[in-house]
Image (cartoon, rainbow, N blue to C red):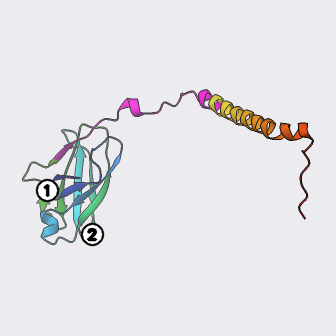
Amino acid sequence: MELVKNIFFNTDKLVENSKVKISYAGTLFQDGSEEVYLHYGFGLNWENLGEIKMEKTELGFQAEVELASYETFNFCFRNGNNEWDNNDGQNYIFPIEKVELSLVVKEDAEIAAPRKLRRSYIWSKKLRLAVYKIITYLPRLISGNYKRKISE
């Protein structure tokens, strides 16, 4: 997904405590820089500062970052010559969405219900098999034609 010209993420939303891959094909790539670094931080005060050397590909530079539990993800780019692409001094700032608690599986969830379902399923299969055998073999037993035929 392209959020800003020449910056792409591998996801539609930036979600806390998840990894995101950033692809950059901006001015530093277009100018032929051999090394580009992703300089990043979180929140209004750029907390948990980090810098990663991005991998050069045919389509641009790429790096993967673990998103922390903050409200925003802030970053900019620099090359080996200390030239910066910081969105004309405004930096690149994107909101980080919180994980919805309704989607989180609780650890203390009871597992007894699926076990009961499994037992009832097995018993229904056994009952069906018994009814099938009675319907199929009872008439043969009554008529005396219950012996298997010997093939020649």
Q: Residue at x 17, y 67 (%)?
A: 29
122 left or right of 72? Answer: right
The answer to which quarter of the image holds residue 33 is bottom left
Relative to 130, 152 lies left or right: right
On the image, the x and y values in percent for residue 47 come to 25, 42
Front in this rendered view, residue 101 or 66: 101
- Say which residue appears at 48% left-offset and 30% top-offset: 106
Q: Amino acid at mark 2?
A: Thr
Q: Is residue 140 above or below residue 108?
A: below
Image-quadrant location for residue 55: bottom left
Residue 109: mark: none
Residue extent of the magenta highlight: 93-115
Residue 57, numbered label: 2
Question: Which mark's residue is nearer the viewer, 1 or 2?
Answer: 1
Residue 107 part of the magenta segment: yes
User: On the image, numbered disc 1 is attached to which residue?
Assistant: 5
Above/below status of 62 relative to 133: below
Secondary structure of residue under mark 2 = strand
* Mark before the other along the chain sequence, 1 or 2: 1
The residue nearer to you, when weighing 52 against 131, is 131
